[in-house]
Amino acid sequence: MIDFRLDDEYEALRKTVHDFAQSEVAPVIGGFYEREEFPYELVAKMGRMGLFGLPFPEEYGGMGGDYFALCLALEELARVDSSVAITLEAGVSLGAMPLYRFGSEEQKREWLPALCAGEALGAFGLTEPGGGSDAGATRTTAKLDGDEWVINGSKSFITNSGTDITRLVTVTAVTGERAGGRKEISAIIVPSGTPGFSVAPKYSKVGWNASDTHELSFADCRVPAANLVGERGRGYAQFLSILDEGRVAIAALSVGLAQGCVDECVRYAGEREAFGHKIGEYQAIQFKIADMEMRAHTARLAYYAAAAKMLRGEPFKKEAAIAKLVSSNAAMDNSRDATQIFGGYGFMNEFPVGRFYRDAKILEIGEGTSEVQRMLIARELGL
C-alpha cells in the first residue's frame, strides 16, 4: 500500500519545527539578514531542540532519528528563512555526517556530541577557487611529515567555517598519486585555531545573508596523522556519497522556500486590493499561485521519494539528483512569481518574498549545479 502521510512521530517533529520557525525565527530574522549577522541565539535554540542531532544515534549525543527527519525540519525552517535552514543543513550533513559515516570511533566520540548539541559547528572543505563543480581538480595538498599532515592550499564558499562556535573543518586534499597519474584524495580534520589555518573575512553575498560563508587558506598547517577521516585515498569517494545525501536535504530546503512563497502570496492576495477588489479574486493571480503550489507539491514528492530509497538502503543517486533539480527550479520560479505578485513591495527587504528571491538562486548552484544534476541523471540512465 502506498501512503504518503507522515507517521505520528514525523508529524510531531514537523509541527514542532513549524511552530518554532513561525514564533521564534520569523519575527527576528529580517533584522539579522539586513545586518548580515549570524543568529547565534536561534542556532542555540535549535541545538537545545535537538535539531542538529536528528539523524545521529543517542550514543553520540544525537536524537536517534533519521535523515528524513532532518529534511522535514529543513523544509519547515526554510518556509520562513533559508539562512537558518542552511546553517542546520550544513552543520549536520556537511559538518557532522562525514565524521559519523567515515570517522574512527575516537573521532566520533571527540567531535559528535558537541556538534549534535549545536554547541559547535563543523564545516565541509571541498570547493576550491579554481575548482567549482570539478571537485576532482583539488589542488590543496597534504603531505605526511612524521606523524603529522602538512596541509597547503585554499577552499572557497565554505558554510559555517568562521563562526565563534566553529570547531573544525574537514577538508579534501591531495595526499599522493595513483597509478596512471590520478590524484589520491583524502579527507582530513583541521580543528579551528590550528596554526597555519586562516579564515578570510566573510563574503558579501547576494543571499543567505544571515549565514556564515568564508574562504579558507592553509599554509604549512600541521595536524596529527590520526586526523585522517576514513581510508587514505577514499576522501573524494566519501565526499561524493555525502553530497548525494546532501542533495536530498537541499531539495527539502528548496521545497520549504517554494512553499513559503505560496504561504506569503495566499496571505497577501487576501489582503491587497486593486481596482476595488482583493487581488486574490483575479484569475491571473489565482492561476499564478496555483502554479506555485503545484511546483512545491511536486518537488516535495520528489524529495520524499529520494529519501525513502535512501532510508531503505537502496541506490538513490538518480532520485537525489532529480529531487535537487526539480526543487531548486521550483524555489527559483516560485520566488520570482511571488515577487511579481507583491509588486513594488516584493522588491523591499521588509517583506519575506524579497529575501526568498535573493536566497533562491544559490539553490541551483550549491551542492551540485543544475547542470551537474542533469549530467548525473543522464549517467544513471546509461547515457
Image (tube, grey):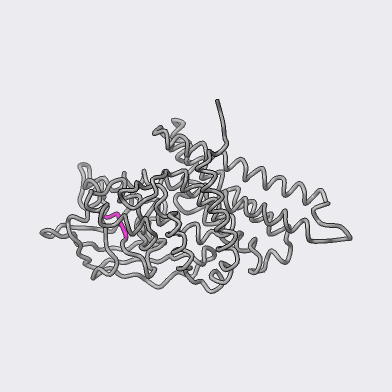
Residue 65 is situated, as x and y percent measured from the top left of the image, at 41, 44
Front in this rendered view, residue 373 or 289:
289
In the image, which residues are magenta?
169-173
Q: Residue at x 83, y 51 (%)?
A: 282
Q: Position of residue 210 (x, y in %)?
A: 50, 67
Q: Residue at x 44, y 30 (%)?
A: 382
Front residue (pair 217, 314): 314
Residue 241 placement, left or right of 342: left
Q: Position of residue 1 (x, y in %)?
A: 55, 25
Residue farthest toward the right in the current orientation of the protein: 276
Q: Camera-side residue: 82 or 134?
A: 82
Residue 117: which quarter of the image? bottom left
Count of numbered marks: 0
Instruction: Pick the quarter of the image with the C terminus.
Output: top left
Prevalent SS, magenta region: strand
Vertical order, 104 against 359 (above or below): above
At 47% from the left edge and 43% from the top edge, which residue is drawn? 68
Q: Is residue 273 magenta?
A: no
Q: Position of residue 254 (x, y in %)?
A: 55, 50
Q: Is 269 placed above or below 239 here?
A: below
Q: Residue at x 57, y 42 (%)?
A: 300
Q: Farthest residue toward the left?
A: 146
Relative side of 226 to 159, left or right: left
Q: Is residue 153 left or right of residue 327?
A: left
Q: Is residue 334 above or below residue 191?
A: above
Q: Is residue 172 magenta?
A: yes
